[in-house]
Amino acid sequence: MDIYDRARESADDYLKAIYILSQDNTMPVRVTDIARLIGYTKASVSRAVRNLLCEGKVTLTPNKRVVLTAEGLAEAKTVYEKNKFFRTILAEAGVDDKTASDEACKMEHALCTDSFEKLRRLLSTSPAPSDNTAN
């Protein structure tokens, strides 16, 4: 994986974190909240937020709260939906919650949106496996 891919994954993870935090309350998100959720230092989160600001994915309120722009929100929702989809599939397959969460985070970055949508469509229309072991 090259440096661009790692940077994109990191930006996606920050967008997802901001999205998750913004769903829990009506207040814009603080850098401290993001750092606590993803386990990074406030300095690292501040740097990432500056990058997202330059990319037009977030804005800052006058009191330095982070708000997703329309573009950032769309990306965050996409990443979150991929994560939720893969986490659910892994959990339903019997994978423990911690492993399912960790692996879903990796899987959300592995597929482009088009491939993800096709996979989601396929799996949502597939019949449930039969447990027909009797002959």
Image: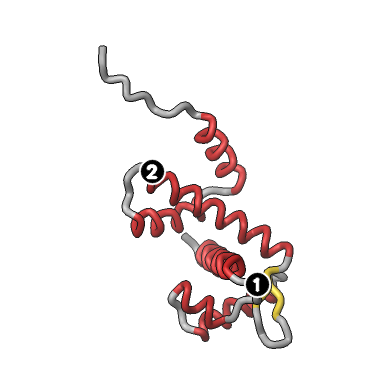
Residue at 72 percent of width and 68 percent of height? 69
Distance between the alpha carbons at the discs numbered 2 and 1: 32 Å
Q: What percent of the width, then of the height, locates residue 65?
A: 65, 81
Q: What percent of the width, then of the height, locates residue 115?
A: 57, 42
Query: Residue 105, relative to residue 85: is it above or below?
Result: below
Query: Residue 58, relative to residue 93: is it above or below?
Result: below
The scheme the figure's colours follow is secondary structure
Q: Amino acid at mark 1?
A: Thr
Q: Where, by quadrant of the figure, is residue 16 drawn?
A: bottom right
- Point out the tag, 2 or 1, that comes first from the N-terminus: 1
Q: Residue furthest top?
A: 135
Residue at 31 percent of width and 20 percent of height? 132
- Mark carried by residue 92: 2
Q: Residues within 10 Å of mark 2 (few under 14, many from 20)?
A: few
Mark 2 or 1: in front is: 1
Q: Residues within 10 Å of mark 1 (few under 14, many from 20)?
A: few
**Circle 1 sits on which residue?**
26
